[in-house]
Image (cartoon, grey):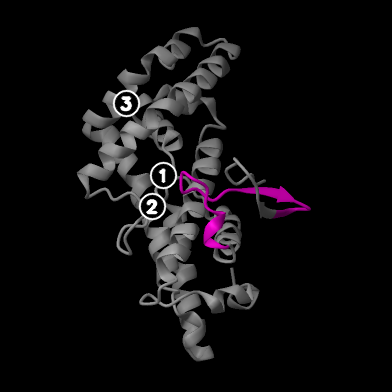
Amino acid sequence: MKPPTFHPCWLTIPAERSAAFLPTFVRMSVAIQCVLRERVPLEYFEDWGKYRHLKTAGPMLVYQASPPFRGKKRTELTYDVLNPALIAMLFRRSRPKLGELLAKAEARLRAEGLAELADQYAPRRTGAILDCVQKLSKSRRHLCVLIRGESVLVDALVQLSGLGDLPPRAQARKFACFEKRWNFQLRRLYQGCDFTHLAPILLEAAEVALQRDPDALDDSGLLSFRHLDGCLQPAEGECPKVG
């Protein structure tokens, strides 16, 4: 992710005090959150053994089930671990999809011949798993790590606001700081797993969102993408499909 490879669209990113700041960064934030929910759990659970540890698997599933947050304030572009109301909303909004994810996890574990472990992920345990993640300090802390991680990534994008107004050397310094911060966070995103390889995918999703018209957001406030000729392109009703 070197400065010369950045798309010229980054020079159009609005300054923090401009009227375009909030709608632009809402789109980019939603795009980042959507890709993270698509890719991070998928790669984390490639090893079915991760399901043996409900205290860490549960938070990942709740995170995956939660819809991206669409901010309405400049200071709230993602869920905030320090805002109890937003975290409570995340848990409420996770419930519908969590049952679907549990059904898939249960089926996979039964296919592996792990009936006893599969029982822990039966859809009927949706409420119990939500309670576990919400009330057990270790599980809640793991969920907060994921939420804080996406917040750090989005905040790093915010630091690029008004980039086009800066001289080339200042742009290069900002790019370097941005790259360092993203790589640092992705390398430690969850349970020692390195997700730095997702940086180009996340960046491309943000670029697509940056260039979209605000009306591209649907009624739920989500911006979505699909692959077209090897590139991420907007589409109806899908989160980013990558890889």
Q: Which numbered tag is attached to residue 149?
A: 2
Which residue matches tag 3? 130
Left or right: where does residue 242 sit relative to residue 51? Answer: right
Between residues 90 and 1, which one lies in front from this camera angle? 90
Which stretch appears magenta? 213-231
Between residues 62 and 42, which one lies in front from this camera angle? 62
The CA distance from mark 3 to mark 2 is 20 Å
Residue neighbourhood size for the residue with mark 2, other residues' Cα within 10 Å, grouped as few (<14), some (14–19), many (≥20): some
| Residue type, label 1 | Tyr
Instruction: Please report contact status of discs 2 and 1: CB closer than 8 Å, yes or no.
Output: yes
Of helix, strand and loop, which one carries label 2?
Answer: helix
The CA distance from mark 2 to mark 1 is 9 Å
* Mark 2 or mark 1, whichever is nearer to me: 2
Q: Give the quadrant of the N terminus.
A: bottom right
Residue neighbourhood size for the residue with mark 1, other residues' Cα within 10 Å, grouped as few (<14), some (14–19), many (≥20): many
Q: Earlier in the sequence, mark 3 or mark 1?
A: 3
Residue neighbourhood size for the residue with mark 3, other residues' Cα within 10 Å, grouped as few (<14), some (14–19), many (≥20): many
Whether residue 235 appears in magenta in the rendering, the answer is no
Left or right: where does residue 180 sit relative to residue 11? Answer: left
Of helix, strand and loop, which one carries label 1?
Answer: loop
Q: Residue at x 35, y 47 (%)?
A: 147
Of helix, strand and loop, which one carries label 3?
Answer: helix
* Mark 3 or mark 2, whichever is nearer to me: 3
Q: Earlier in the sequence, mark 2 or mark 1?
A: 2
Between residues 110 and 228, which one lies in front from this camera angle? 228
The CA distance from mark 3 to mark 1 is 19 Å
Residue lying farthest to the right in this orientation = 229
Q: Residue at x 58, y 64 (%)?
A: 207
Rendered position, 128 above or below 199 = above
| Residue type, label 3 | Leu
Which residue matches tag 1? 190
